[in-house]
Image (tube, rainbow, N blue to C red):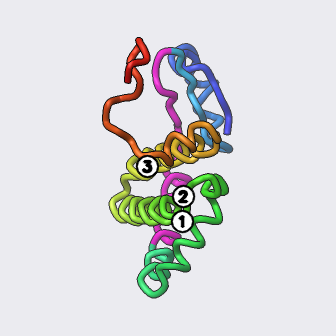
Amino acid sequence: MKTFPFSALARDRNEVFPELDVADVLLERRDAENVWLVRDERYQAARAALLTLARSMTIVARSNRVLAEEALAEDLPWLIWLPEHERLQCVRELLAHLLAGADTGELLPYARARRSWTSTALAWSDPEIARDLANPFDGSGGQSIDGAG
């Protein structure tokens, strides 16, 4: 991977495009999301590999859902911070998003779900927050400013 400021593309594309022969290019933008430039051959190779892996995981999931969930969990060491019932729910949800994304080519729902579950696990890793999460919620939104409830 080679990194350039986004302005380099407009300023001198002859500096940027030759790099695509040997690597993907990340164009960094200050006030917007970064942009990747990838040659089609490398993009198609990565997509084919992802589809093969996802289809293989689908076959495993159909015949042995528990094994598929265990395989996904190997990549998510932060699962240890989730309570057991949430751990299983997380792995099942992520696996479902991954399989759907591989089938459709739309992986953003998987990425969003993974970020959400990672944040949840981080919350559970804090003993004080975990204690609050484990207690029943009364629905009042917590104590009022004057401490009256």
Is disc 2 in contact with disc 1, using a CB cutoff of under 8 Å?
A: yes
In this rendering, is residue 18 above or below 115? above
Q: Which residue is mark 1?
A: 49
Task: Please name the residue shown 44% across and 62% down the image.
Answer: 89
Judge left or right: residue 146 versus residue 122: left
Q: Quadrant of the C terminus?
A: top left
Please report the residue visible at 44 percent of the width from the left and 66 percent of the height from the top: 92
Q: Check contact, mark 2 vs mark 3: CB within 8 A.
A: no
| Mark 3 or 1, nearer chain start | 1
Magenta-colored segment: predominant secondary structure: helix
Q: Secondary structure at mark 1?
A: helix
Q: Which residue is mark 2?
A: 46
For disc 3, the neighbor class at 10 Å (few under 14, some 14 to 19, many from 20) is some
Q: Is residue 14 above or below residue 74?
A: above
Q: Which mark is residue 76?
A: none
The kind of residue tagged 1 is Ala
- Farthest bottom residue? 63
Q: Residue furthest front?
A: 148
Q: Which residues are magenta?
A: 31-54
Quick one: 63 or 144, which is closer to the camera? Answer: 144
Up/down of 11 relative to 40, above or below: above
Query: Mark 3 = which residue?
Result: 113
